[in-house]
Amino acid sequence: MASSRTQLHTVELLESEKVVANGVARQTWSVHQEGCFRPAHRLPGAEVTMRSSGSGFIWARTVALKLATGTRLELTQESPRPREHSSTFKILTLDQKSSTLRRKTLHEISSDGRVVRLAR
């Protein structure tokens, strides 16, 4: 007899912020719940463990969650845009948002509990 219960898997997601050329790079995860993506580290039941950060890291943490098969996740990776040679004035007055590259990729929890990237 097949079980109709949803299978839960414990997954660990790595989030971090580190110093890179021209600024800071950040990697964070969000989980799709109730029609929107919510930060993984703020979800009820999330176990957040700060990790010892190596050279160049500002912080790093592991977020452990119990998630059902098929749960959608979004990985956000932010990094500074490469800078063109320009004047100090231009660098200081550059809009911070326009100087950041942001890439979001969708993932899903597979039936065996792996975080799998979805094709676009």
Image (tube, grey):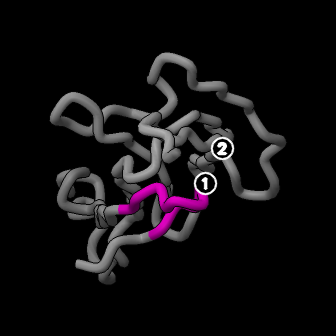
Q: Quadrant for residue 65, please give it.
A: top right
Whole-percent x and y of residue 70?
Answer: 38, 53
Front one among 57 and 85: 57
* Residue under the point 41% across and 63% down: 79
Front one among 9 and 84: 9
Residue 71: say if magenta: no
Name the disc covering residue 18, or none: 1
Q: Secondary structure at mark 2?
A: strand
Q: Secondary structure at mark 1?
A: strand
Q: CB atoms at circles 2 and 1 under 8 Å apart?
A: yes
Q: Is residue 27 left or right of residue 87?
A: right
* Residue under the point 28% across and 53% down: 92
Q: Residue furthest front?
A: 1
Q: Is residue 54 left or right of residue 48?
A: right
* Residue under the point 62% across and 46% down: 11
Whole-percent x and y of residue 98?
Answer: 18, 60
Front one among 60 and 65: 65
Front one among 33 and 55: 33
Which amino acid, by three-letter code, is at mark 1?
Lys
* Vertical side of 78 occupied by 33: above or below: above
* Vertical side of 15 occupied by 22: above or below: below
